[in-house]
């Protein structure tokens, strides 16, 4: 699969299909049920990926983790205590993990990039490890992408908390979901554009 088609497909699987499944299921199943349905495309993709390459897609795993955590918070006692703010807090936790990973040698986006290469060709993860050690520009770009994802997700969290505080429940749920998938989509598209720019600069 050529790079542009591969990343377009990744966007569809990780953003477009979960969002579509959520909106289709929401009227009949409610928010927890709709979140569960939105995980189906991710689980199918991860299952196929594992069967073909014995590999789990890291981006899909992160999106799925966010959905699972959101569902657990929604149905838990903590969810009742937090009221309308309960579900947006999950994306803030994930964003904080991105930012905290900047404090260690290999931040989260390192593992996302490594995961992508492993799917393309067997043993390419070792090649990526060597490039990480020998290319300062690569390390800088990975850290920048980690920071952008972290700030983007924390910012999305703050916006959705504001929506929960200022908008009525029915409209707030809908607007909050739009903000969530718009953020994931925007960050994914920015990552694709930035990667292409980086490759051109290094060519």
Image: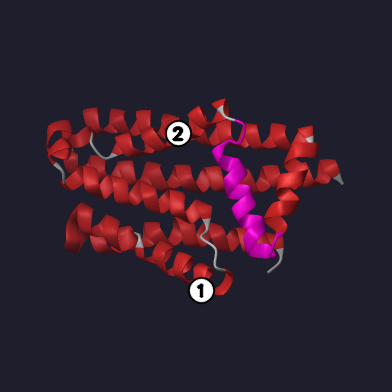
Asked if the residues shown at circle 2 and circle 1 are in contact, with their CB atoms under 8 angstroms apart, the answer is no
Label 1 crowd (10 A; few <14 / some 14-19 / many >=20): few
Work out whether 9 lies above or below 77: below
The answer to if 6 sits in the magenta stretch is no
| Quadrant in which the N terminus appears | bottom right
Residue of label 1: 51
Disc 2 to disc 1, how far (Cα)?
A: 29 Å
What residue do we see at 76% from left, 45% from top?
A: 130
The magenta region covers: 105-123
What residue do we see at 47% from left, 55% from top?
A: 60
Q: Nearer the viewer, residue 57 or 26?
A: 57
Decide if residue 167 is in sight here.
no
Residue of label 2: 97
Which callout, 2 or 1, points at the residue further toward the start of the chain? 1
Work out whether 87 lies above or below 36: above
On the image, the x and y values in percent for residue 46 come to 47, 64
Q: Classify mark 2: helix, strand or loop.
A: helix
């Amino acid at each position: 699969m050529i790079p542009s088609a591969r990343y377009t497909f990744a966007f569809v699987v990780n953003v477009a299909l979960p969002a579509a499944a959520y909106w289709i299921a929401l009227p009949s199943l409610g928010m927890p049920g709709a979140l569960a349905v939105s995980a189906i495309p991710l689980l199918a993709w991860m299952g196929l990926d594992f069967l073909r390459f014995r590999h789990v897609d890291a981006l899909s795993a992160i999106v799925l983790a966010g959905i699972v955590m959101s569902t657990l918070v929604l149905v838990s006692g903590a969810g009742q205590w937090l009221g309308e703010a309960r579900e947006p807090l999950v994306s803030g936790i994930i964003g904080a993990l991105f930012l905290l990973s900047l404090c260690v040698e290999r931040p989260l986006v390192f593992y996302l990039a490594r995961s992508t290469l492993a799917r393309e060709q067997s043993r390419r993860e070792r090649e990526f490890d060597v490039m990480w050690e020998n290319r300062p520009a690569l390390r800088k770009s990975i850290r920048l992408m980690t920071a952008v994802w972290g700030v983007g997700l924390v910012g999305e969290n703050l916006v959705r908390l504001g929506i929960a505080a200022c908008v009525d429940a029915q409209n707030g749920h809908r607007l909050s979901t739009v903000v969530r998938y718009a953020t994931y989509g925007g960050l994914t598209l920015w990552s694709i554009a930035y990667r292409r720019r980086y490759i051109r600069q290094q060519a």
